[in-house]
Image (cartoon, rainbow, N blue to C red):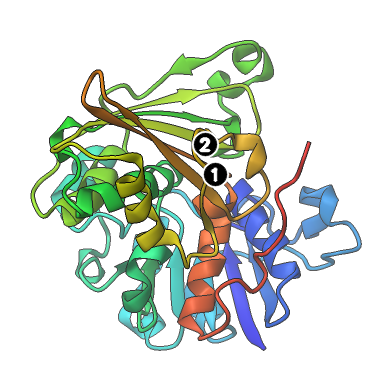
């Protein structure tokens, strides 16, 4: 039985890790970490966990936690994991970090976009970007996993195969993305109040969103050259879900069957990426509460562009589900263990 600890267990992503691991036959959660609710019963923070979790919330003492568990999930704000991790800890335990601390390989880019000093840049080089469908072989032997962001996961999985195969021009990519309000976390923010969000949709972080360099870095690996994109996120009045619509210029004439064959070659054996049937556009309601990503495409002959679409649950495949998928790979478990729940509908 794998023993797991969660630092940041009372945020939305942390609670989702708890929910998923409660259904995982090979894992026991032994530490529910939370700075805000120390000594409070976990179910008192999340009443949906009543009679499911009787444990009390602990602190974020990673040194102590590393002696008690096999894997630590850090579902924390940017900068915290980097301030806690050290070589002594990594020799004892595997860490799956859901923040951005180890996603971007150039520390100067991280510090410029996140406006904080990186506390442990020495570990950036060894951290593996935990996009399972692309980096599976590297994940298996890692000590430190940088769990991808929600927007990057959906964007990269939608675009990556076509860039890798040289079908589209990387620097022509424009990503229009929309997310439910849970993507902003559980903290109280004026812009996320009901009356601010309900019956409204708005763009935010236009030209400045912090997921931009993460997406660019991963797409650059696919393309084989530096990629610079336009990425514009939007907040929509729903709890969960991400919808990505990306536009890219074609480098050559292609047919539907040719593009479909590329997607099938990359994702045909992937359990959690579903390439939809022709003319079916991804919808967030078809993936809610699940670890699935639905993708599809449309060739626009008139403009010589390819339109790439993806939908997923930002808290599952965009955070907690992908973290559990990474854990399964790290420990040699079936990758689907604890994650084969059907999407919730309606």
First of labels 2, 1 by sequence position: 2
Numbered circle sitting on residue 140 = none
The image quadrant of residue 137 is: bottom left
Element assignment for label 1:
loop
Measured as percent of width and height from the top left, residue 169 is found at 15, 38
Vertical side of 210 occupied by 102: above or below:
below
Measured as percent of width and height from the top left, residue 9 is found at 63, 58
Q: In the image as oriented, which residue stretches furthest toward the right?
A: 51
**Residue 289 versus residue 82: which sits nearer the camera?**
289
- On the picture, is 174 further left or further right than 223? right
Q: Is residue 153 visible?
A: yes
The quarter of the image holding the C terminus is top right
Residue at the spot of label 2? 242
User: Is there a contact, CB below 8 Å, between mark 2 and mark 1?
Assistant: yes
- Distance CA(mark 2)–CA(mark 1): 6 Å
Residue at 67% x, 89% y is: 1
Residue at 56% x, 67% y is: 324
Residue at 49% x, 53% y is: 76
**Residue 86 versus residue 114: which sits nearer the camera?**
114
Residue at 40% x, 81% y is: 89
Measured as percent of width and height from the top left, residue 220 is found at 17, 50
The image quadrant of residue 271 is: bottom right
Characterize the local packing of mark 2: few (<14), some (14-19) or many (20 or more) Cα atoms within 10 angstroms: many
Element assignment for label 2:
strand
């Amino acid at each position: 039985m794998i023993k797991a600890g969660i630092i940041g267990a009372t945020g939305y992503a942390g609670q989702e890790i708890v929910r998923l691991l409660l259904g995982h036959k090979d894992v026991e959660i032994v530490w529910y970490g939370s700075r805000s609710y120390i000594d409070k019963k976990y179910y008192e923070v999340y009443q949906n966990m009543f009679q499911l979790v009787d444990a009390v919330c602990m602190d974020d003492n990673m040194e102590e936690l590393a002696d008690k568990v096999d894997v630590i999930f850090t579902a924390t704000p940017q900068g915290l994991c980097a301030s806690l991790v050290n070589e002594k800890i990594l020799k004892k335990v595997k860490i799956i970090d859901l923040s951005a601390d180890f996603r971007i390989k150039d520390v100067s880019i991280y510090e410029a976009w996140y406006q904080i000093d990186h506390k442990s840049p020495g570990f950036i080089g060894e951290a593996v970007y935990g996009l399972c469908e692309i980096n599976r072989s590297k994940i298996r032997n890692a000590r430190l996993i940088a769990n991808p962001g929600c927007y990057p996961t959906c964007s990269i999985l939608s675009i990556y195969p076509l860039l890798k195969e040289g079908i589209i021009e990387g620097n022509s990519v424009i990503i229009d993305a929309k997310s439910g309000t849970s993507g902003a976390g559980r903290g109280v923010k004026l812009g996320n109040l009901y009356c601010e969000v309900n019956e409204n949709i708005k763009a935010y972080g236009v030209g400045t969103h912090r997921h931009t360099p993460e997406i660019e870095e991963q797409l650059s690996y696919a393309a084989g050259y530096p990629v610079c994109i336009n990425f514009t996120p939007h907040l929509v009045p729903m709890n969960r879900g991400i919808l990505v619509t990306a536009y890219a210029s074609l480098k050559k004439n292609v047919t539907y069957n040719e593009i479909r064959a590329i997607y099938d070659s990359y994702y045909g054996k992937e359990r959690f990426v579903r390439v939809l049937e022709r003319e079916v556009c991804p919808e967030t309601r078809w993936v809610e509460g699940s670890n699935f990503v639905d993708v599809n495409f449309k060739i626009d002959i008139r403009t010589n562009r390819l339109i790439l679409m993806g939908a997923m649950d930002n808290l599952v495949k965009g955070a907690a589900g992908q973290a559990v998928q990474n854990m399964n790979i790290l420990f040699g478990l079936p990758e689907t263990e604890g994650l084969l729940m059907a999407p919730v509908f309606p």
